[in-house]
Image: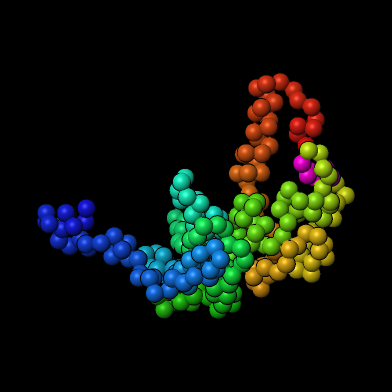
Amino acid sequence: MLKIWNKHGFDTLPLTAATLLRIPDQSSVIRTIETRSSLDYVYLGLRSQIQVALDDYSIRSLEEIEISLNIDGLPLFKSSPKCVWPILCAIHVNPTVVVPIAICYGLAKPSNLDFLKDSVSEMKDVMENGITVKNRNIRVILRCIVCDCPARAMVTNTKLCSGYYGCDRCTQKGDWCGKVIYRETVNITLRTDASFRNHEQPEHHHGQTPFSSLPIDMVRQFSIDYMHQACLGVTKRLLHAWINGSKKNEAFV
């Protein structure tokens, strides 16, 4: 369409979407990080993506910015198992802008956490030294890391919530009631950043995670997934009970 418009008087428009959106050529950085699952990986860069995003903003009075990360899998086709795992960064300015940092593409989800290393390494550097935009150094604060439950368990290298030691917030052992549930709400031992990093409950962990190298709270800064925990969890059951009548207590455990 850009080429058509260019021929009909809009000759100041670029001929390609990449030029229009100022997308840099990243073909040279695509590499394979897992040969077994044919997982291709491209790293776009945290610092460079933030700098490009802030280029359109007035930063005269801006001394620091907060960012959030999001990691999740996305199926591309119904007829194929191929999927992408993007690492996205939300920059909390007004309005909030979201930019990609890295993208993985393959037949399955990553079997290890190597795809996080570039992002975490640069995140650590950016948090320590800030970024330079328009000759100004701006401090960068990581607000939180947003993932749904399966993705959060994967990137933190911990047990899934369906496991006996899968609770992200406390150390209680789950009970089996057709599925693993966590009954206790009082007098429980909460997880802390220190207990997580020291693996004080080894049953909760599969191993180390690259995120532990960042100066963040490994418990509190991994936010609870509101959509699955509230909207598709408790709210769904409450609506079912309100519409269809009372249910046994076990249905709400």
Res 217 → quadrant:
bottom right
Q: Kindly report the secondary structure that dominates the magenta region of the rendered protein.
A: loop
Residue at point 82%, 62% (across, down): 201
Can I make out residue 150 in this image? yes
Residue at point 81%, 39% (across, down): 177
Residue at point 79%, 69% (across, down): 198
Question: What residue occupies the far right of the structure in this picture?
Answer: 187
Per the rendered image, the range of residues in magenta is 179-184
Please determine whether, in this image, residue 9 is positioned above or below residue 79. Answer: below
User: Where residue 167 sits: x, y (%)?
Assistant: 76, 52
Please determine whether, in this image, residue 170 is positioned above or below residue 140. Answer: above
Please determine whether, in this image, residue 61 is positioned above or below residue 170. Answer: below
Res 232 → quadrant:
top right
| 56 with respect to 181 (left or right) | left
Can I make out residue 62 in this image? no
Q: Nearer the viewer, residue 23 or 178?
A: 178
User: Where residue 114 sits: x, y (%)?
Assistant: 59, 70
User: Where residue 176 sits: x, y (%)?
Assistant: 82, 42
